[in-house]
Image: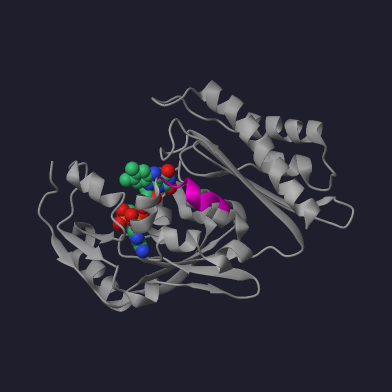
Amino acid sequence: MKAAPFDHHAPETVAEAAALLAEFGDEAKVLAGGQSLLPLLSLRLTRFEHLVDVHRVVELHGITRTDDALRIGAATLQAEAEHDAVVAGAVPLLARALPHIGHFQIRNRGTVGGSLAHADPASELPTVALTLGATFEAASVRGTREIAADDFFTGTWSTALAEDEILVGTRFPVWAGRTGYGFAEVARRHGDFALAGVAAAVALDADDRITRVAVGMLGVGATPVRVGAAEAALVGTVPDGAALAEAARAGMAALDPADDLHATAAYRRRVGAHLMETALGAAIEEARRG
Ligand SMILES: Cc1cc2nc3c(=O)[nH]c(=O)nc-3n(C[C@H](O)[C@H](O)[C@H](O)COP(=O)(O)OP(=O)(O)OC[C@H]3O[C@@H](n4cnc5c(N)ncnc54)[C@H](O)[C@@H]3O)c2cc1C
């Protein structure tokens, strides 16, 4: 099938893009890399009269680092972020997660902001953003605002962005000290969306005690989720293998994954606990070496 006819707009500034969204209201949609939107349009699962293509908006491109944050412009390609040394140095969890997104052809077209705004609960980048407590920058004709990751993902394919808002960029916190990161997921085939996945970050003190830990999961709810029960079980401890297994068990017990066409809830629980142990183990090991 082919998409229903639409007008293609190619603004060159955020202000122009915001004005188009304000003018056309619910008949308009932002088009970034098109890797999620175009299949939906082509299958006629959705339809918009106006597509506001943000590819030429220079303000939306680029990666910048400050002392405590890494900022990625919304239209920055996933492949650019994946191969960027600044990203790998500042927020290693992003560098670990990015190669798991689809295939390289997808990452060559798909954008970081597009993945975050699309908010698929089985997506890697939303999970990393939630795990690390990223901040989202939004713009519209009404002005700009910031949205905390905890408030951003509101449901499957749904975010706190208003219809007339553009995601301009995302700031990921840079963790300092002896830190380590782990990312693990399971998919039926390479390139498929994951059935479940885990992102983990830890910081250790000089005695290898966990001073800070963040664990997030994809594929186990309507949004990416923070696994507070696993975090609470680990903070302040010097965990061994048994403690990691217990934290993962407690983490999964607090979640409520669903059955769907791809996997049962019971499978997601079992594999989720294993992935959590794997990701946390890798993160702790890396931090101990640091
Ligand atoms: C075969 C295949 C496999 C894939 N596998 C994975 C996978 O394993 N993991 C994964 O995470 N993703 C996967 N994807 C999706 C891919 O990551 C997409 O690139 C991403 O979800 C959307 O990014 P995009 O730039 O292509 O956005 P688009 O498809 O252009 O847009 C997606 C949505 O985000 C909105 N949007 C985009 N940019 C903005 C903005 N700046 N402000 C406001 N709204 C905006 C659009 O309006 C639209 O609703 C896969 C896609 C395909 C086709």
Rendered location of residue 60, percent (x, y)? 38, 72
**In the image, what residue occupies the spot 27% across and 77% down?**
12
Residue sitting farthest toward the left: 5
**In the image, what residue occupies the spot 38% across and 59% down?**
111
- Quadrant, the C terminus: bottom right
- Quadrant, the N terminus: top left
Left or right, residue 221 beside residue 114: right
Specify whether residue 211 is in view: no
**In the image, what residue occupies the spot 23% across and 65% down?**
52
- Is residue 59 placed above or below 189 in the rendered structure? below
Which one is in front, 216 or 150?
216
Left or right, residue 189 beside residue 251: left
Residue sitting farthest toward the right: 207
Magenta span: predominant SS is helix
Rendered location of residue 98, percent (x, y)? 49, 52
- Is residue 194 placed above or below 130 in the rendered structure? above
Left or right, residue 10 beside residue 275: left
> Does the magenta-highlighted stretch encompass residue 62?
no
What segment carries the magenta color? 96-102
Rendered location of residue 151, percent (x, y)? 51, 55
Counting every numbered tag in the picture gives 0
- Is residue 260 placed above or below 251 in the rendered structure? above
Rendered location of residue 176, percent (x, y)? 72, 65
**In the image, what residue occupies the spot 35% across and 51% down?**
105
> Does the magenta-highlighted stretch encompass residue 99?
yes
